[in-house]
Amino acid sequence: MDPVLAGTLGGVIGLTIGVLVMWASRRNAVSGDPASTPQTLVPEGVRDVLAVLRSSAVVLNVHDEVVSTSPSAVSYGLVRHGELVHDELAQLVRAVRHDGVVREVELELLKGPSADSSVVMAVRVAALGADHVLVLAEDRTHARRVEEVRRDFVANVSHELKTPVGGISLLAEAVLDGRDDPEAVGRFAHRIQVESARLTHLVQDIVDLSRLQVADTLHAPELVGIDQVVLEAMSRVELAAQARDISVTRDTDPSLRVFGDAELLTTAVTNLLTNAVNYSEAHTAISVRSLRVGDSVEIAVADQGRGVPAADQERVFERFYRVDPARSRETGGTGLGLAIVKHVCATHGGEVVLWSEAGKGSIFTMRLPVANPGPHGEAIT
């Protein structure tokens, strides 16, 4: 568990438990009624406090019977028919009741009868007065997944960097060994340039993607003309397209605008065009079209390539995923271009979708909220 988050969670839950214990103790001291049954009754006001907690809360009596629970505890499958569902939680409750020591653990628990449905819960169990035990559970499933994605990302980056760095190192040795052969030196030097360019591209893509993941929202969106974005993106792939005799045409509406970051949008369209150039056959055509559909602006990049197999279409936007690894090595692809497109669209409140059919090419479409500027540039909704 992240130390900062764990500390914050522990502090909030600890404060809550302290308040509840003080409340219960004062209530018991004031009551002093021997006829009351504190083993089954929850101290007055405790339910009100539990109701406002974000954590799932369960209160058990001395017989391990659930006497109070929050709705979320039931929805998460922690409580069913008035009992704790999971043996792990029951064991923690018994241990706390035995020695009074607060327990804090992270557990992966089944959310329902299906073994495929589970949640990761940060659990804190503490005594609540003399007769009750309080269980508080915080859903950590999303945080765990984010941490796993982060670890995978670091591992993938390390692996991807090794290839060009290792290639440059070996080529440098070859240059030294062949320094008396000008032709060999020239050939190896050219390969060093290629690997250096690949490394530069990879590092830039990593920086771009990392920046997008940190900045989930646009801090200062501006009015951006889609026509200018497309023109700039086309200019960036012009040389690569000409080298393979691939024509790039556009059919864009100059009146279409969105609120966002012009550079990020240009990068996204450039990545789609670059992807189309790299995976199209020579002497074919690529088209870029923009149009308004309802409240959205659509930017569609269509190619006449081999298409994306159906089995790969849901994964092409994953980081470092390549449909054709050999082609990616040949073209210097990093496997991050489409992931960047996806994040740019999400940051602008939109999405990117793919249509593709084997032998007929592919169409990648960015959908972004349209901007209707007023006379002074403000958004009209």
Image: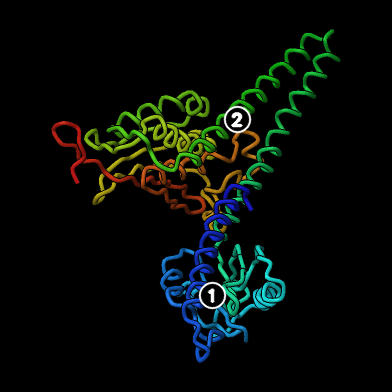
Instruction: Report x, y in % for residue 128.
Output: 57, 72
Instruction: Report x, y in % for residue 145.
Output: 59, 55
Q: Is residue 171 left or right of residue 33?
A: right
Numbered disc in front, either 1 or 2: 1
Is residue 74 shown to the viewer in this render?
Answer: no
Q: How is the image coloured?
A: rainbow
Badge 2 element: helix
Q: Amino acid at mark 2?
A: Val
Q: Is residue 379 above or below residue 79?
A: above
Badge 1 element: strand
Q: Residue at x 42, y 33 (%)?
A: 264
Question: Splitting the image into 4 quarters, where does residue 106 fall?
Answer: bottom right
Disc ID at residue 358:
none
Q: Residue at x 59, y 51 (%)?
A: 7
Q: Please tell me how crowded label 2 is: few (under 14), some (14-19), or many (20+) other residues with Cα within 10 Å.
A: some
Give the residue at mark 1: 58
Q: Is residue 246 left or right of residue 160?
A: left
Q: Please tell me how crowded label 1 is: few (under 14), some (14-19), or many (20+) other residues with Cα within 10 Å.
A: many
Q: Amino acid at mark 1?
A: Val
Q: Residue at x 63, y 28 (%)?
A: 198
Among numbered discs 1 and 2, the one appearing first in the sequence: 1
Count of picture labels = 2
Q: Is residue 148 above or below residue 252?
A: below
Give the residue at mark 2: 203
Instruction: Report x, y in % for residue 48.
Output: 41, 72
